[in-house]
Image: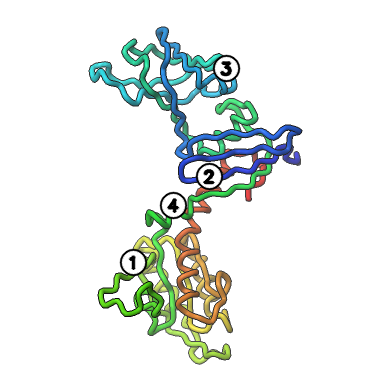
């Protein structure tokens, strides 16, 4: 097994991604848009060859195989202005697979690729064209992907699984609000898509008062999965004292292909049920988003790379 020889720290923000390679004697940096789009301007054009001084900082051959599109084509009868880049060099020239009309001189373009911003940044820092493989690396990643998913409500379709009698737990909530005596209360919409009740009960000392019916749980989870639920947030009464029933539910959930199953006794073993449920739901809601993103990165990296 080859040990990674490169160490990267990458911060993926809402607008920009910053890549730092700090295993070399000289620290190397590269900044790019988190959207993975690379923007430029056509300063000169000779048939199928574009000149843009901004591309002078890119490694030779870096953009081969990617797509370039003119993004503010003023003359509407120029037709499609998307081309494939077949050559690029550090002089700032991009050679396309077919010529562009001369009317695009002075206009902006964007280069698109299927790679995410961290992968593009690693290639750029190491001077490796995008159509070539990367060596093993150690990558430490910080990202706002979870925050963005929370703000835009684009997380997983999540169901709350709780003890019978507490299905409306998150809707009722508690007395915590900015203006305690406000008559027109505007409640935050819960992250969950739905909730179900499990017929079980554990007392405050952890004693099982009503054992869980595994067959019933299996039927309930079958219905959730058939309804398109992607992630489960399991939060049962007094599970912070005795997590047995939550673990039973998590074990049964393995029979299905849920993207994520979060249990409160592991995520946030707190005495307060509402706080515990809120944290568990958030974990279940965002876990698939972050897991999928990390998996995409690992797919593009060398098999012996490490991502954390």
Of residues 63 and 255, the one nearer the viewer is 63
The location of residue 293, given as percent across then percent down, is: 51, 48
Whichever of callouts 4 and 2 sits on the residue coming sooner in the sequence is: 2
Give the CA separation, mark 3 to mark 4.
35 Å
Q: For the residues marked 2 and 1, what is the alpha-carbon distance in whole angstroms?
A: 28 Å
Residue to which mark 1 is pinned: 189
Of the image marks 4 and 1, the number of the one nearer the N terminus: 4
Check disc 4: other Cα within 10 Å, few if <14, some if 14-19, many if 20+: some
In the image, what residue occupies the spot 60% across and 47% down? 141
Query: Percent x, y for residue 245?
Result: 53, 80
Q: CA distance from mark 4 to mark 2?
A: 11 Å
120 left or right of 216 in image: right
- Comes first in the chain, label 3 or label 2: 2
Tell me which label, 3 or 4, sits earlier in the chain.
Answer: 3
Q: Residue tagged by mark 4?
A: 148
Residue on which disc 3 sits: 90
């Amino acid at each position: 097994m080859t040990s990674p020889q490169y160490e990267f720290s990458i911060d993926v923000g809402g607008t920009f991604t910053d890549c730092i390679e700090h295993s070399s004697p000289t620290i190397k940096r590269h900044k790019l848009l988190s959207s993975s789009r690379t923007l430029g301007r056509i300063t000169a054009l000779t048939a199928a060859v574009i000149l843009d001084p901004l591309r002078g900082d890119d490694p030779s051959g870096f953009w081969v195989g990617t797509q370039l599109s003119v993004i503010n084509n003023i003359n509407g009868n120029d037709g499609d202005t998307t081309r494939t880049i077949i050559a690029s060099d550090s002089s700032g020239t991009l050679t396309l697979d077919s010529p562009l009309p001369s009317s695009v001189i002075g206009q902006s373009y964007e280069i698109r690729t299927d790679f995410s911003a961290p992968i593009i940044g690693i290639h750029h820092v190491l001077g490796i064209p995008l159509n070539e493989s990367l060596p093993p690396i150690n990558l430490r990643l910080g990202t706002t992907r979870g925050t963005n998913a929370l703000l835009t409500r684009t997380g997983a379709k999540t169901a709350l699984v709780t003890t019978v009698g507490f299905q409306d737990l998150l809707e009722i909530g508690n007395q915590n609000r900015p203006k305690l005596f406000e008559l027109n209360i505007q409640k935050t919409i819960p992250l969950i898509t739905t909730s179900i009740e499990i017929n079980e009960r554990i007392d405050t000392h952890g004693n099982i008062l009503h054992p869980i019916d595994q067959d019933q749980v299996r039927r309930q989870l079958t219905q959730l999965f058939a309804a398109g639920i992607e992630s489960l947030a399991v939060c049962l009464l007094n599970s912070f004292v005795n997590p047995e029933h939550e673990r039973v539910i998590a074990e049964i959930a393995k029979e299905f292909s849920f993207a994520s199953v979060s249990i409160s006794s592991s995520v946030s073993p707190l005495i307060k049920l509402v706080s515990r449920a809120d944290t568990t739901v958030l974990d279940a809601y965002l876990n698939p988003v972050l897991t999928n993103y990390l998996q995409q990165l690992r797919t593009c990296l060398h098999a012996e790379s490490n991502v954390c």
